Structures are given as structure tokens and as C-alpha cells.
């Protein structure tokens, strides 16, 4: 079941990446770097504000997963969670609008024409944030029932619709940011409609479901620190582009955002896997949950490291093939170092989800709160002193701090764990040390294949015997061996 659900979840994440890759050059050529940088920040603000509702969605998933033997309780948790999300989402929408009004009106370095378009788009940012927030709660209810095909299809349509509808609306109605944000709102509404129909048709149609204060309180109590983490994590994630926008301007935001957007999409693979893992961890306790999380974390590194290493070798030729003369040369160096940062982020996601599923999410949330001020100071200093690469280094250092903290707090960081990380660490160091010396794309492709393959084989060779046995048993079940 985990393998099947993982496949659906990964597919729902990969398709929007492919759509973005295809459409971005056309969208960038149509609206220009300045408007694209501004649009990227609009998406950033509304996504950030809507992620507050991740805590409610995760709490719904947890409650529904634990109520497997009590269908009425599961439906009550769904209904109560959705009403709770509807009550909280207007707050997040107002929050998004206020952030957009202050930032775009006072701090963002952009032309007067684009600034006026941004100000006129503020209410659309808030409306999109509201719809996106409610969608996260509906998604959480479907995931709690492990209905990943329906949930993944809806989110795939919504996320793919962002660039596709932006390109379509810009061609038909003009390149104004107001038009582009109408396209974004339409994409989010389409996703919410699909999610809501799937939930109603599969779980709620013809069934009774009751909204109670006690269940709402329980959901909020479980999800409060996840909500805090969901608020703080996007803030930490968006600070880099906000600082670039203030210090270096909209064109620099585009140069940073283009590789960031594609590379961050790679993270959808581990995110898709941990979404599948969360309901299973929620149904487990103690040693069983620890072993599942520990083995899943090792498997995540073994699968994701070769992909990142291959991308380090290929990012420069791929970006040049993709964008041609529209490529900012600084984007290549930015993308290379961002790959290392997102590798760190990917391998620790299992640890964060493990802590959340066992009711220990407060630890990481408090740590992230403590990071906000020092990280902001480091970002401003790095941007002033070293420009866009200073921001990249600051981002990488923050990811390293988070990784070390989560390894320690999850108690995963024993000798066995660090031994399994040796191939990935050696491969990343090899890739960073050699990529600049390879003269053409053919040599880079060959080196990427060799190093990534060696890392994958090494990870399999030193994987714990229990993990190998678990994987072999799953393969036998799948193929009836």
C-alpha cells in the first residue's frame, strides 16, 4: 500500500514540475523578468500564508488515520476540521493581504507601473490564500483515508494550473499582474473543487457527520505546533527572496527564483513520500514508529542523493538549453549550491514528520522560531557584502543547522545512520569539486551517471539488513515472487 500510494503522490508532484519546465520560458518571455520576479513573490506570499492551515490538515489526517475502526468518528473529524479551516482561513487571507500591501507598497524595488499592478492585485492574493488554505484541510481528510489517487490528481491539476493559466490569461487578457493573479485564483479554485467533490463522493455522501467543539479543540491542540512550524518554516523559506527584493531588486529575484523554483520542485519527491508515511506513523507508537521512521529516512537518502548529484552536473547545460539567451549567468552558480541545501532539507523531512506523528512537533517549531532573527540578520549582511551568492550560502547554513537539530531530536543519529550517509556525503563533495572542470555537457552527463550510480550502489551495500529485508518483502508482495 505504501509503494502504491507513494507512486500516486510522486506522480502528482512531478507532473507540475514538468509543466513548469515547459511553460516558464514562454511565460518569462511574455511578461519579462521584472513581472515574473513580482509574480513569484505574489505566489510566495499567498502560499506562505496558506501553509498555516497545514497544521489543521495534518491534524485531520492524524485523527482520521487513528479512527480506522470508527467510521463515524472519522467523518466527524473531517467535518469538524473543515469547519475549523473555514473559520481560520479568512485570518490567513487578511494576513497575506497585509503582508503584500506593506511589502509591495514600501519595500519592494520595482518600477512604478508594476508596483501599481501589485497594489491592485492585493485582494486577489488574499482570496487565493483563502482557497489554498481550505484546500489543505480537504486534502488532509483524503490523505487520512489514504485516498492518494484522488488527492494527488486534484493537487496536480491545481499546481499545474498556476503556470498554464498564467500563460493563457496573459496571452488573452494582457500581461498585467492583476490578470496573472486572476489566473492563480482560478487554478486554486479548480483544485479545491476537485478535492471537495472527491471527499464528498467518497466519504460524506449520504452519511451523517457532526461538528463538535471538543473535536475542534482536539484538532487544534494536536495541530497547534504544526501550525506554528507551518507558519515559521515558510517565513524562513521566503526570507531569502524578500531580502533579495529589498536589497537587489526584482531582476535579481528572477535570477534567484528561476533555479530555486525548479530545484525546490525536486523536493516534492521526498515531500510526496513523507505524506504517504504520515498516516502510517500516526497509527504506530513507540518502537514500531521509530523503526519505520528510521528505515524510511535511510531509504530517502539513498534514493534522493543520486538525483541531486546528477543535477549538480547537469544544471548548467539544462538551464542553458531551457532558457537560452534569457538565462542569467548567476542562476547557474545559485542553482548548484541550492541543490546541496535542498538535499539536506529532503533527508530530514522524515525526521520532522516522525516527531509530528508522535506528538513531538513542538521541538522543531520552537527551534525554527529561534532561527528567525539570526537568520534574517545573516541574510541582510550576506546580501550587502556578497550579493546573491551570500544569500545562497546563508540559506545553506540554515539547512545544515536544521538537519543537525532534527537528527539529534529524533534520536536517529546513531552510528548506523551516519555510516549510511557516507556515500551521499562523498558523492556530493565529489560533484561540487569536479563539476567546474568538465568542459562540455557530454563529459558532465557521463560524470553524473558514474558518480550518482556509485553513490546508489554504495548506499545499498551498507544499508541495514532489516531495511534490505523489508524492501525485498515489499517487492515479493508486489510481484508475487
Image: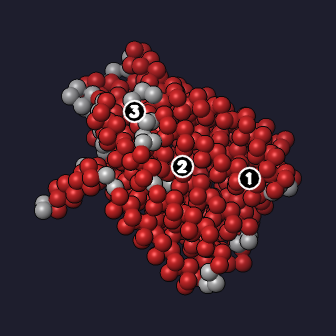
The residues tagged by marks 2 and 1 sit, at their Cα atoms, a distance apart of 17 Å
Residue 305 location, x and y as percent?
47, 60
Q: Tell me the residue that label 1 is attached to.
A: 391
What element does badge 2 sit on?
A: helix
Residue sticking out furthest to the front? 415
Does 140 sit above or below residue 382? above
Give the side of residue 67 with respect to residue 172, left or right. Answer: left
Asked whether the viewer can see residue 462, the reply is: yes
Q: Nearer the viewer, residue 64 or 372?
A: 372
Residue 243 location, x and y as percent?
77, 47
- Could you classify mark 3 by the number of other residues whose Cα lies within 10 Å: few (under 14), some (14-19), or many (20 or more)? many
Q: Nearer the viewer, residue 248 or 411?
A: 411
Residue 236 location, x and y as percent?
65, 41
Q: Tell me the residue that label 3 is attached to.
A: 357
What element does badge 1 sit on?
A: helix
Does 59 sit above or below residue 267? above
- Residue shown at 46%/69% (left/top)? 452
Tell which circle, 3 or 2, labels the residue nearer the N-terminal end. 2
Tell which circle, 1 or 3, labels the residue nearer the N-terminal end. 3
Disc number placed over residue 345 in the picture, else none = 2
Asked whether the residues under the numbered discs 1 and 3 touch, taking CB atoms below 8 Å apart as contact, a structural biologist would say: no
The residues tagged by marks 3 and 2 sit, at their Cα atoms, a distance apart of 18 Å
Residue sticking out furthest to the top? 214
Q: Nearer the viewer, residue 204 or 57?
A: 57
Q: Nearer the viewer, residue 253 or 366?
A: 366
- Could you classify mark 2 by the number of other residues whose Cα lies within 10 Å: few (under 14), some (14-19), or many (20 or more)? many
Asked whether the residues under the numbered discs 2 and 1 touch, taking CB atoms below 8 Å apart as contact, a structural biologist would say: no
Amino acid at each position: 500500500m505504501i509503494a502504491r500510494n507513494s507512486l500516486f503522490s510522486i506522480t502528482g508532484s512531478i507532473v507540475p514540475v514538468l509543466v513548469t519546465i515547459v511553460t516558464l520560458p514562454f511565460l518569462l518571455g511574455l511578461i519579462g523578468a521584472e513581472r515574473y520576479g513580482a509574480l513569484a513573490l505574489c505566489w510566495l506570499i499567498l502560499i506562505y500564508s496558506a501553509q498555516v492551515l497545514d497544521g489543521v490538515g495534518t491534524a485531520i489526517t492524524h485523527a482520521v488515520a487513528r479512527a480506522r475502526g470508527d467510521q463515524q468518528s472519522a467523518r466527524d473529524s473531517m467535518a469538524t476540521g473543515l469547519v475549523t479551516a473555514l473559520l481560520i482561513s479568512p485570518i490567513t487571507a487578511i494576513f497575506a493581504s497585509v503582508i503584500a500591501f506593506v511589502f509591495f507598497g514600501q519595500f519592494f524595488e520595482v518600477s512604478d507601473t508594476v508596483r501599481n499592478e501589485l497594489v491592485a492585485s492585493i485582494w486577489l492574493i488574499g482570496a487565493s490564500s483563502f482557497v489554498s488554505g481550505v484546500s489543505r484541510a480537504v486534502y488532509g481528510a483524503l490523505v487520512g483515508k489514504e485516498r492518494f489517487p484522488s488527492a494527488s490528481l486534484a493537487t496536480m491539476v491545481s499546481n499545474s494550473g498556476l503556470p498554464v493559466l498564467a500563460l493563457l490569461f496573459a496571452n488573452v487578457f494582457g500581461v498585467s499582474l492583476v490578470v496573472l493573479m486572476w489566473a492563480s485564483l482560478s487554478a486554486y479554485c479548480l483544485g479545491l473543487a476537485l478535492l471537495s467533490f472527491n471527499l464528498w463522493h467518497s466519504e460524506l455522501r449520504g452519511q451523517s457527520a457532526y461538528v463538535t467543539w471538543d473535536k475542534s479543540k482536539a484538532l487544534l491542540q494536536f495541530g497547534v505546533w504544526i501550525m506554528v512550524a507551518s507558519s515559521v518554516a515558510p517565513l524562513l523559506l521566503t526570507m531569502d527572496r524578500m531580502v533579495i527584493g529589498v536589497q537587489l531588486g526584482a531582476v535579481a529575484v528572477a535570477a534567484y527564483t528561476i533555479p530555486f523554483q525548479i530545484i525546490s520542485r525536486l523536493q516534492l519527491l521526498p515531500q510526496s513520500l513523507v505524506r504517504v508515511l504520515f498516516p502510517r506513523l500516526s497509527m504506530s507508537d513507540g518502537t514500531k514508529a521509530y523503526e519505520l521512521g528510521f528505515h524510511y529516512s535511510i531509504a530517502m537518502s539513498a534514493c534522493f542523493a543520486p538525483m541531486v548529484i546528477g543535477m549538480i552536473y547537469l544544471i548548467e547545460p539544462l538551464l542553458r538549453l531551457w532558457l537560452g539567451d534569457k538565462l542569467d549567468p548567476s542562476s547557474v552558480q545559485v542553482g548548484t549550491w541550492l541543490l546541496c541545501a535542498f538535499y539536506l532539507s529532503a533527508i530530514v523531512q522524515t525526521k520532522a514528520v516522525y516527531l509530528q506523528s508522535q506528538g513531538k512537533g513542538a521541538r522543531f517549531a520552537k527551534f525554527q522560531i529561534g532561527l528567525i532573527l539570526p537568520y534574517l540578520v545573516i541574510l541582510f549582511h550576506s546580501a550587502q557584502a556578497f550579493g546573491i551568492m551570500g544569500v545562497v550560502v546563508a540559506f545553506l547554513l540554515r539547512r545544515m543547522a536544521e538537519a543537525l537539530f532534527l537528527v539529534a531530536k529524533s534520536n536517529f543519529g546513531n552510528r548506523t545512520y551516519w555510516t549510511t550517509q557516507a556515500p551521499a556525503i562523498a558523492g556530493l563533495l565529489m560533484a561540487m569539486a569536479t563539476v567546474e572542470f568538465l568542459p562540455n555537457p557530454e563529459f558532465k552527463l557521463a560524470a553524473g551517471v558514474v558518480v550518482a550510480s556509485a553513490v546508489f550502489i554504495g548506499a545499498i551495500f551498507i544499508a541495514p539488513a532489516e531495511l534490505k529485508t523489508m524492501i525485498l518483502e515489499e517487492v515479493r508482495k508486489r510481484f508475487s515472487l
